[in-house]
Amino acid sequence: MKTKAAVLFEMGKPMPYAMSRPLEVLEVDLEEPGLGEVLVEVRAAGLCHSDLSAIDGTRPWPLPIVLGHEAAGIVRAVGPGVRDLVEGDHVVFSFVPMCGSCRYCVAGRPYLCERGVQANREGRLITGARRFYL
């Protein structure tokens, strides 16, 4: 399916960003949800400090990258194996995906999930997949 995304192709453009325009809002291809994944219609999103640190290059990420992980929306489709969400549920996003089984997830600190942090660093989902394509 087609959707729009804020894509960063180059880090370190000068401020003010309203002039240098580091993000491009583009139409991209988005695959259907895979095992354990959901498709969410984003109803609200923002840029946070993590996004700004990717834009200015202080926290390098693989490029191109789709920014805007602070979001909320409505589940529109569920992938195989999803049991705790259904179409129509309202959800919020998290910066770090969580595996549910590492020492941090088990200890109630999923924001430190080892597999989630690694997936973020690689620019992939926790399953290793990528769903956006330019």
Image (spheres, rainbow, N blue to C red):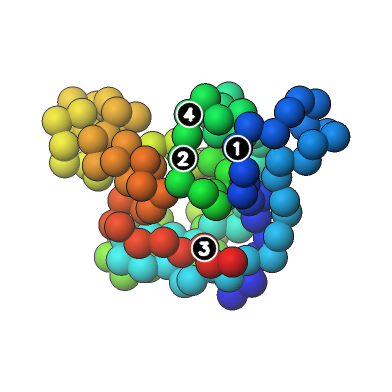
Q: Mark 2 near mark 1, Cβ–Cβ under 8 Å? A: yes
* Gap in angstroms between the C-alphas marked 3 and 1: 19 Å
Choose mark 4 or mark 1, whichever is in front.
1
Q: Which mark is first along the chain, 3 or 2?
A: 2
Q: Secondary structure at mark 3?
A: strand
Q: Secondary structure at mark 1?
A: loop
* Gap in angstroms between the C-alphas marked 2 and 3: 16 Å
Three-letter amino acid code at disc 4? Arg
Q: Residues within 10 Å of mark 2 (few under 14, many from 20)?
A: some
Q: Residue at x 66, y 50 (%)?
A: 6
Q: Residues within 10 Å of mark 4 (few under 14, many from 20)?
A: few
Q: In the picture, residue 68 is in which quadrant?
A: top right
Choose mark 3 or mark 4, whichever is in front.
4
Q: Mark 3 near mark 1, Cβ–Cβ under 8 Å? A: no
> Would you say 16 lies left or right of 116 here?
right
Q: Secondary structure at mark 2?
A: loop
Give the residue pinned by disc 3: 132
Q: Residue at x 46, y 40 (%)?
A: 61
> Would you say 45 lies left or right of 89 here?
right
Q: In the picture, residue 4 is in which quadrant?
A: bottom right
From what the image shows, is residue 38 above or below residue 99?
below
* Gap in angstroms between the C-alphas marked 4 and 1: 9 Å
Query: Residue 44, position in %: x, y?
Result: 67, 43
Report the disc number at residue 59: 4
Q: Mark 2 near mark 4, Cβ–Cβ under 8 Å? A: yes
Report the disc number at residue 11: 1
Q: Which mark is first along the chain, 4 or 3?
A: 4
Give the residue pinned by disc 2: 61
Three-letter amino acid code at disc 2? Trp
The quarter of the rendered structure image containing the C terminus is bottom right
Q: Residue at x 27, y 34 (%)?
A: 113
Q: Which mark is first along the chain, 1 or 3?
A: 1
